[in-house]
């Protein structure tokens, strides 16, 4: 609502503009004011009414009285019900043959009185921000790793597959099967990867979930020595580590996955060795234009995809009537994002990752 003194100033300025030869409609448009509002202000100025709109505040007829509100608050804070949420209080009152107010009314009154707080012994729910968006434009920039169970012949006893995958090429750059979960064992696997892949300081970002081997002191100390920046998912959110989860699904749902549990650790390691060779060297990965992870990791996919493109172009030139549009797209995927932001659909490039994560640390 515009104050009366400001209205009078606007009316005076519009009147001066009209006297000077301007049209009232154009003058109102300049100051973004409706002519109808200007007319109402003129009437209010004549009748000395600031605003003729009703100021009546409607009160619901079924509103609780003051005593009833106090009764609701007294029940909600009583020794019997003080530790319970309104969703638990209302049914208990009904079992005792007592109706005081609805569940929503309990919640509303507690909120008004600033009493709607967490009442249980466990920690209240906490909002977790999405992990920082990461981006890889070449191999050996962004790794993802996780651990999965491999069943044994003894129920409740498992072997543990440690797996490190390059997000850009989808190549498993390191793995091992152990009998236990340990950050010390994971750090040794990571150390071996850095030697074989010739990883330099501040070259790789390693993403994982929040398991104890991932956040163990030994693992974090080794990453610091190797110059690798860690990145973590939100607790209990598997979607934040999709590349590792996707690999484990491929592993456990492939046709050759053993139907029976592994007899011993050697049997598990032998089978995983065979699978890893197939996955890296023979498997055509759909997300990287159906080349093998090893080819993409070595940069051989560039020439291979060019040859495919030329082959299809030649086939179309020989029989153009067989194509109603363009040939199949064999364009190389040059950027791979991990947990991209929904708003921008973009992630930090490799140089920005280290700067941002270092500031966060």
Image (cartoon, grey):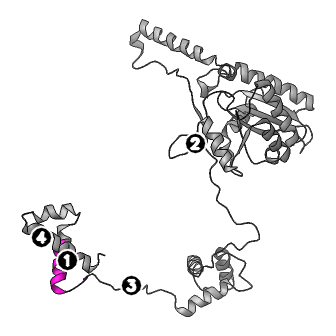
Which label number is shown at residue 16? Answer: 4
Location of mark 1 (residue): 41
Question: Is residue 160 at all visible to an observer of this figure?
Answer: no
Secondary structure of residue under mark 2:
loop
Secondary structure of residue under mark 1:
helix
Secondary structure of residue under mark 4:
helix
Locate residue 321 relative to residue 18 in the image: left or right. right
**What residue lies at 56% left-to-right and 16% top-to-bottom?**
305
Location of mark 3 (residue): 58
Nearest to viewer (mark 1 / mark 4) = 4
Check the picture and name the quadrant holding the N terminus.
Answer: bottom left
Residue 41 appears in which quarter of the rendering?
bottom left
Q: Earlier in the sequence, mark 2 or mark 4?
A: 4
Q: Earlier in the sequence, mark 2 or mark 3?
A: 3
Towards the viewer: 357 or 196: 357
Location of mark 2 (residue): 340
Question: Against 17, is 71 above or below?
Answer: below
Mark 2 Cα within 10 Å, few/some/many (few <14, many 20+)?
some
Distance Cα–Cα, label 1 vs label 4: 16 Å
* Magenta region, residue range: 38-58
Query: Residue 274's x, y, as percent?
Result: 81, 22
**Residue 157 within the magenta-colored segment of the rendering:** no
Q: Earlier in the sequence, mark 2 or mark 1?
A: 1
**Residue 56 within the magenta-colored segment of the rendering:** yes
Distance Cα–Cα, label 2 vs label 4: 57 Å
Question: Against 60, is 308 above or below?
Answer: above
Mark 1 Cα within 10 Å, few/some/many (few <14, many 20+)?
many
The residue positioned farthest toward the top in the image shown: 318
Nearest to viewer (mark 1 / mark 3) = 1
Distance Cα–Cα, label 2 vs label 3: 48 Å
3 and 4 marks in contact (CB < 8 Å)? no
Secondary structure of residue under mark 3:
loop
């Amino acid at each position: 609502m515009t104050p009366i003194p400001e209205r009078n100033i606007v009316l005076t300025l519009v009147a001066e503009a009209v006297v000077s030869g301007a049209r009232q409609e154009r003058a109102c448009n300049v100051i973004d004011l409706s002519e109808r509002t200007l007319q109402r202000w003129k009437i209010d100025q004549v009748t000395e009414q600031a605003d003729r709109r009703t100021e009546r505040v409607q009160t619901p007829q079924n509103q609780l009285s003051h005593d009833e509100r106090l009764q609701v608050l007294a029940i909600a804070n009583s020794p019997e019900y003080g530790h319970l949420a309104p969703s638990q209080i209302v049914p208990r009152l009904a079992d005792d043959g007592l109706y005081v107010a609805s569940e929503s009314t309990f919640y509303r009154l507690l909120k008004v009185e600033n009493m709607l707080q967490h009442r249980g012994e466990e920690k209240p729910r906490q909002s977790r921000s999405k992990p920082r968006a990461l981006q890889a434009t070449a191999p050996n920039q962004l790794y993802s790793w996780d651990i999965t169970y491999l069943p044994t012949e003894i129920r409740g006893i498992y072997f543990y597959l440690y797996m490190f995958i390059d997000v850009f090429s989808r190549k498993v750059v390191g793995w091992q099967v152990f009998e236990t979960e340990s950050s010390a064992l994971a750090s040794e696997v990571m150390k071996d990867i850095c030697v074989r892949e010739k990883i330099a300081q501040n070259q790789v970002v390693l993403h994982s979930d929040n398991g104890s081997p991932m956040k163990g002191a030994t693992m974090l100390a080794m990453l610091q020595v190797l110059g690798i920046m860690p990145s973590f998912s939100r607790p209990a959110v598997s979607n934040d580590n999709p590349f590792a989860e996707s690999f484990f699904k491929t592993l456990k749902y492939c046709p050759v996955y053993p139907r029976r549990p592994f007899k011993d650790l050697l049997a598990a390691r032998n089978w995983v060795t065979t699978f890893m060779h197939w996955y890296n060297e023979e498997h055509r990965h759909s997300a990287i234009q159906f080349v093998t992870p090893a080819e993409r990791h070595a940069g051989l996919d560039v020439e291979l995809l060019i040859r495919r493109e030329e082959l299809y172009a030649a086939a179309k030139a020989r029989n153009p009537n067989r194509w109603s549009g363009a040939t199949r797209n064999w364009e190389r995927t040059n950027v791979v994002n991990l947990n991209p932001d929904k708003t921008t659909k973009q992630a930090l490039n490799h140089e920005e990752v280290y700067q941002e994560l270092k500031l966060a640390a």
